[in-house]
Amino acid sequence: MKSVVIGAHLLRDDVEPVATAIPVGDLYLSAVEVPDDQPVGDRELLLKVAGVRARLLEAATFVAIRYGLSLASPDEALGKCAAHLTRWKKVLTAHRDHVEMTLKVAAATTMLRPDRHDFTSGADYLRALHAAQQASNVDPAFREAADRLFAPFSVKKRWEHRDERSVELAALVERARLDEVKAAGEELRALSPAVPFLLSGPWPLEVFADADRE
Amino acid sequence: MSDELEELPLLETLDHLLDRGVIIAGEAVISIGDVDLLYLGLNVVLANVDAIIRTSKR
């Protein structure tokens, strides 16, 4: 069997019995056990992990680990995570009562995604791809309204260019104030009915898992 | 509710699962211009180039 890792948690009880707990230093990884020959890209596994991830978040906030990491043994877990443990513990302790919310906004200005066939250099293609992402932007009035409406309950906020067509506001909010976040989303919809956006969450620590690097 | 709206939560969930969170298996760092690009091990091949560029900026 191999372990498909989902997140890093402060307590064993934050993981069990929803998922398998793998000790790494003072922390615990959550994982789903699957046969060695099951591809990580298997659709059913993907859906199963998504479900477990949601149930884990109901128990407690955790650091999300990008899907695709699978481990053969607890020793391998420690080896791969050792460099992160101090930072994770700090983040998990500081944000135990916080979750992330995401406001994905359709870009008002966009640049066409470059076609890789137009490039003979991979580096040039990556530069063009990066430039196209950075060119996307949201209406300034919408951005100001979003910043203002989400400010009262946001511990941290960060706008990011996700792709050529959308820009995203990630907000770290108090778990107990999720109803206010949803109300802010409804107010934003009323203020800016012409701007397509999607407010989603709660999510684990995805964007704000890198506190020491900010 | 339309099929599109019904599919939104699942698509958003999968987007977060596949495209967010900490990447563990960074093995080397290469740079293009002023953008550091993380070279990732085979166990994170599901991350796309866009995601790698974003991650490297943090």
Image (cartoon, coloured by chain):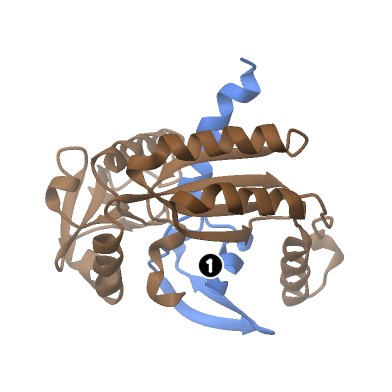
| Camera sees residue B13 | no
Does residue A64 appear left or right of residue A96 in this picture?
A: right
Tell me which residue sits at (83%, 69%) in the image: A119
| Quadrant of residue B52 within the rendered picture | bottom right
Give the side of residue A103 with respect to residue A112, left or right. left
x, y percentage for residue A182? 50, 35
- The chain ID associated with circle 1 is B
The residue lying toward the viewer, choosing from A49 and A191, is: A191
Along the line of sight, the residue nearer the viewer: A117 or A67: A67
Mark 1 surroundings: few (<14), some (14-19) or many (≥20) residues within 10 A: some
- Which residue is located at x 31 percent, y 58 percent? A95
Mark 1, secondary structure of its residue: helix
The residue sitting at 17% across, 50% down in the picture is: A21
What residue did someone put label 1 on? Answer: B55
Residue type pointed to by label 1:
Thr
Judged from this view, the residue extending furthest toward the top is B1
Res. A114 in view: yes
Q: In the rendered picture of this protein, how many numbered marks are placed on residues? A: 1
Position in image of residue A71 (x %, y %):
27, 58
Chain identifier of the blue chain: B
A151 relative position to A142: left or right: left
| Residue A197 screen position, x and y as percent | 66, 39
Q: Quadrant of residue A213?
A: bottom left
Q: Does residue A142 appear to the left or right of A147 in the view shown?
A: right
Position of B8 relative to A164 (above/below): above
Q: Which chain is brown?
A: A
In the image, what residue occupies the spot 82% across and 54% down?
A110
Vertical placement of A36 versus A194: above or below? below
* Residue B10: image location, x then y, percent: 51, 32
Q: Quadrant of residue A206?
A: bottom left
